[in-house]
Amino acid sequence: MSTVRDRDLTRGARRAGALVCLLLALLSAGWIVRDLAVARHSADVWWTWLGDARRPRESTAWATSPLDPLLVLGALATAVAVRRSAVSSPVAAGALLSLALATALLRTPLTWTLGAGRLPGPDGGLTAQARASALVQLALAVALLVVVAADRRRGGRAGRHTRRPARGLAAVASSAYGVVHTAPHGADAGPPGRPYKGAATVAAVLLGAAGAAVAGWEVHWWVRIGGDVYRKGLLGDASVFGALLAPPVHWHALALALLALGAAAAALRQASWARPAALTAAALLAVHGATALAFAGRTGQFGRLAVLPGVARLELATAAFVTAAGLTALIAAARPGAPDATEDPDAVRAYGSAPDAARPPHAPPPPSTLPPGW
């Protein structure tokens, strides 16, 4: 068996990964439904995600942020991807690992910000439920890591006992008369699913620039407001109230910068898992920038652009760049990567049916005119 096939996720691993993704999506979807139930109008949830301070119908607090619908969509897309039989493990495993890492980074601070005590507004039971939900999602993220790690370890042990086949058209699996088994086209193009050079370069440059821009603003705020105040926005503070499942603002920004820079590095290397990592980081960056732009438009900042301070104008320009960079990188990363060389390794062709088909040893040359149905 080819070592390329040994890199495929097993059917059981794909099923387990897809099930965990569905559970992640259901948890966030349940909190979105809860917010819709307590909203005065359904649109209030949307405007709250965009930063507009609106009160729910009851004496309670909002639970979700723009990250929650993105997590639902990302988890569902990952579940569909890993269930596709043609998806090879570098891509499928990369999708699972990207989702797990993003979930872990963005949910980790909730383990202490929601456990520090009772928050004004929401009752203690709601806070406890939100914290329990965050802990379950963290456990599911760890489960994704375990599924991929265990499957790769099992595949590595199996791969050591398989023989590495010859490459190209010399990989003749059978010398039966008139029949040749050849490796699929592109078998030597590298690991299946890896991005091509052009798309990888575009994604790497845009993600790297956007991640550096977000990180640069965090350095600016740390210098401007001081370490003590910045630490409250980084690790959370009981005096700062927002959506229960939203991470602290500075933690959120630094997590996005880290994901973007990591995905940019993977794209530069044209790693086989770079495409799912770039898709995850690009989607998060696009939503992050678009949310800031929507809030600026809602508060009329674009109409007062000429009288805004220079720092405010620069911040809006950065949000516009991050949005555009995220969307462009999303398109580049969504382009198909290198074909999977294991889609049909046992394909059988007559050796005279194509000009590149190798003739088996001791077989006569093909006839000048092929028989009907050849």
Image (spheres, helix red, strand yellow):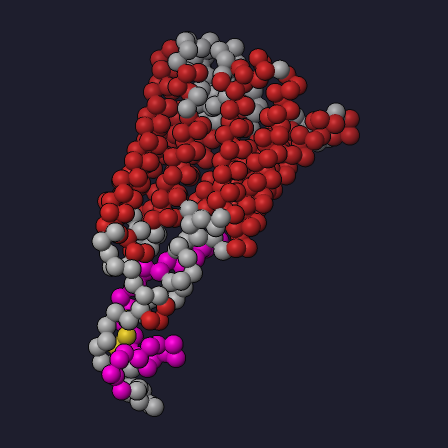
For the view shown, which residue lies furthest in the bottom direction? 368
Q: Residue at x 31, y 69 (%)?
A: 171
369 vs 312, left or right, is left
Q: Range of the magenta residues? A: 335-364
Q: Residue at x 46, y 46 (%)?
A: 274
Query: How far from the left and from the top, in percent, is residue 255?
Result: 50, 30
Q: Nearer the viewer, residue 235 or 50?
A: 235
How far across and how far down the image is residue 26, in percent? 34, 32
Q: Position of residue 108 (x, y in %)?
A: 41, 24
- The secondary structure that most of the magenta stretch takes on is loop
Q: Could one spot residue 365 in this view of the protein? A: yes
Q: Is residue 187 left or right of residue 222?
A: left
Name the residue: 42% across, 20% down. 110
The number of callouts visible is: 0
Look at 34% across and 20% down and name the residue there.
Answer: 132
Q: Is residue 44 left or right of residue 179?
A: right
Q: Check if residue 293 falls in the magenta segment.
A: no
**Which of the two residues, 240 or 356, is positioned nearer the viewer here?**
356
Where residue 262 appears, x then y in whole percent? 49, 38
Residue closest to the eye, 68 or 238 = 238
